């Protein structure tokens, strides 16, 4: 099973036929993020449009998937409907382990299915199934039917899109096993453009574990670190929503389209409030003993005498920020109701909340009217937002169709770019200061997890541009290696370089273990060169004025420092892009 090449299934959706190919490069790109970029360079037309049927949609796992806990992510790589450039999106759930059991390091989809279809792949199975009857169904309804159609519960992973993905909306995500998502940068639109409603990965094979005592001994040590120390406790206990109160206290929580960074009404949406009143249970990605997924409930009275219809809804810091503080909604059940609608329609919750926050302020300021919004959007009005989410998912008029392509696209048409909370894409739930704003605006995925800019802001008051940029570049390289291992980034404190080297050695990837630094930098370079080749120009990124109006624990954001930081970071990325090409194998 340990192989120094990648075993990749390439499926042409136009014909429904596939072939398994061996792709060299384990020692150069490792897997996950590195493998996604490598396959993209092989299969994509860098300058072709994102919805050209030949553009690939890639799913890749890492060398430690299935061997160690929390190696739980799958990396999706594709040309994004959001910015028409190279994009990566990561999701947990069962997809990574299912791919491992299907004996695949990656799945590459090219072409377009002739009819609305579901793709089924396993270790000995490939089928493109006509599922036109699922068209238009929401994520929950289609999930129920797909689970009945494709047996193998436990070893099976089901990826699906909702109506937003079918509309090719740039804010549509891919739902993975109900509670996880390839959320950002429009993966759902990319799947919709391929006429695929769903992918079922059937983990119907098996793989041997390492013989001898070294592997079980190391596994146990890792497992203990994850479960018997307090390193992962916060994720299990309150989960990421623990951050809501902390960031609010720090003046780093975005409120009402980032018009404020703290609010006394936070108590209705803190992690503590959710856990005490709305939490039903915890869940976990396959192979994870931490279980950070927190599931609450949303209920609706359908009859007198206290008869309720209810749905289980997962929540995290980011969905709470996007549909709670950003929209001025301060009741945890009202937040869960909005998240539920977003989930069912298959939108990315962060992009949706931030876009609707901009639309609300645009309406308040008269930049748009109710003729465009069709609704009296108002901060705090959760029921109105539920309706607005539907309008966005279905693209009911020009305004919502444009907004669904990105807040700045709508602002370019209607005005209001100054207060669009966009940093490469709609912001994440951290208003920590200049370093974070520059890091999301220029990060490869425009994700708060590309590098720890949000943490740097919380620890440094100095304004040394060079020092901050050095930190962002180095931190990004080490995270690129972690995401090439497909480690859950919550475990980054546990899986340091030394432990990763031990894990790689024990499963038989000694060469990779000995070259982590060089491979990390190679992957970082490969990803950036791939992104730049698809048209990204870091020097042309501008950060909207709203981010300079923010007050954090450090005081008012320093616009000059922010601009210098952004320019210096952009220069470094362009220098990296201009270096000799990243090392990739021939063949
Ligand atoms: S910590 Fe959470 S997100 Fe990470 S693998 Fe475990 S359950 Fe999944």
Image (cartoon, rainbow, N blue to C red):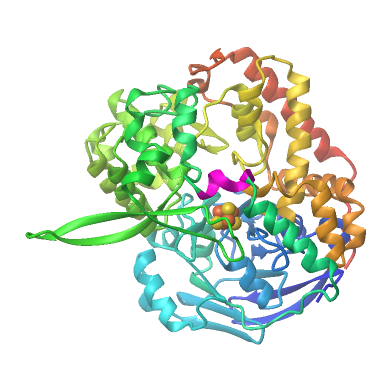
The verdict on residue 44 being magenta is no
550 up-or-down from 81: above or below: above
- Region rendered in magenta: 230-236
Q: Quadrant of ligand 1?
A: bottom right
Q: Is residue 312 left or right of residue 206?
A: left
**Residue shown at 71%/74% (left/top)?**
104
Is most of the magenta stretch helix, strand or loop? helix
Residue 178 visible somewhere in the drawing: yes
Query: From this viewpoint, which residue is outermost toward the front?
Result: 228
Q: Nearer the viewer, residue 40 or 70?
A: 70
Q: Report x, y in % for residue 155.
A: 57, 76
Q: Is residue 483 left or right of residue 279?
A: right
Q: Report x, y in % for residue 551.
A: 49, 16
Q: Report x, y in % for residue 436.
A: 61, 29
Q: Nearer the viewer, residue 384 or 207?
A: 207
Locate residue 33: give its quadrant: bottom right
Quadrant that contains the N terminus:
bottom right
**Residue shown at 85%/64% (left/top)?**
506
The total number of labels drawn is 0
Residue 541 visible somewhere in the drawing: no
């Amino acid at each position: 099973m340990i192989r120094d090449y990648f075993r990749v299934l390439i499926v042409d959706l136009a014909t429904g036929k596939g072939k398994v190919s061996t792709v060299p490069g384990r020692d150069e790109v490792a897997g996950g993020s590195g493998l996604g970029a490598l396959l993209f360079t092989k299969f994509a037309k860098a300058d072709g449009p994102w919805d050209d049927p030949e553009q690939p949609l890639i799913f890749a796992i890492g060398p430690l998937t299935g061997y160690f806990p929390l190696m739980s992510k799958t990396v999706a790589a594709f040309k994004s409907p959001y910015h028409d450039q190279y994009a990566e999106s990561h999701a947990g759930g069962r997809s990574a382990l299912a791919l491992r059991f299907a004996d695949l390091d990656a799945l590459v989809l090219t072409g377009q299915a002739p009819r609305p279809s579901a793709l089924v792949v396993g270790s000995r199975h490939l089928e493109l199934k006509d599922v036109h009857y699922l068209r238009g169904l929401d994520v929950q309804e289609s999930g129920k039917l797909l689970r009945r159609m494709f047996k193998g519960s436990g070893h099976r992973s089901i990826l699906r899109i909702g109506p937003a993905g079918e509309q090719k909306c740039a804010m549509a995500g891919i739902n993975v096993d109900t509670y996880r998502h390839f959320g950002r940068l429009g993966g759902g639109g990319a799947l919709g453009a391929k006429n695929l409603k769903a992918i079922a990965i059937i983990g119907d094979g098996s793989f041997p574990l390492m013989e001898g005592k070294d592997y079980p001994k190391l596994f146990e040590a890792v497992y203990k670190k994850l479960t018997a120390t307090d390193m992962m406790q916060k994720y299990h206990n309150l989960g990421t929503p623990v951050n809501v109160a902390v960031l609010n206290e720090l003046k780093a929580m975005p409120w009402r389209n980032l018009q404020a960074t703290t609010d006394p009404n936070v108590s209705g949406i803190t992690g503590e409030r959710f856990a005490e009143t709305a939490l039903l249970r915890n869940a976990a990605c396959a192979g994870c003993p931490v279980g950070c997924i927190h599931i609450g409930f949303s209920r609706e009275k359908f009859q007198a005498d206290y008869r309720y219809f209810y749905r289980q809804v997962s929540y995290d810091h980011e969905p709470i920020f996007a549909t709670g503080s950003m929209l001025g909604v301060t009741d945890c059940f009202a937040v869960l109701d909005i998240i539920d609608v977003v989930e069912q329609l298959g939108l990315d919750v962060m992009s949706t909340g931030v876009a609707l926050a901009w639309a609300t302020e645009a309406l308040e300021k008269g930049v748009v009217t109710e003729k465009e919004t069709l609704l009296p959007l108002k901060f705090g009005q959760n029921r109105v937002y539920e309706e607005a989410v539907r309008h966005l998912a279905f693209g009911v008029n020009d305004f919502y169709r444009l907004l669904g392509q990105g807040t700045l696209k709508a602002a370019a048409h209607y005005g209001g770019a100054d207060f669009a909370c966009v940093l490469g894409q709609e912001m994440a739930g951290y208003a920590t200061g200049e370093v974070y704003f520059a890091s999301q605006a220029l990060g490869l995925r425009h994700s708060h997890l590309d590098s720890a800019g949000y943490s740097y802001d919380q620890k440094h008051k100095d304004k040394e541009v060079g020092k901050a940029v050095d930190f962002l570049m180095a931190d990004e390289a080490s995270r690129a290696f972690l995401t090439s291992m497909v480690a859950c980034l919550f475990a980054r404190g546990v899986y340091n370089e030394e432990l990763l080297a031990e894990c790689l050695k024990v499963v038989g990837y000694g060469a990779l273990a000995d070259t982590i630094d060089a491979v990390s930098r190679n992957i970082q370079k490969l990803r950036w060169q791939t992104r730049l080749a698809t048209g990204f120009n870091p020097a042309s990124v501008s950060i909207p004025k709203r981010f300079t109006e923010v007050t954090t624990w450090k005081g008012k954001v320093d616009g000059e420092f922010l601009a210098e930081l952004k320019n210096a970071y952009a220069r470094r990325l362009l220098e990296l892009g201009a270096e000799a090409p990243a090392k990739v194998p021939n063949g």
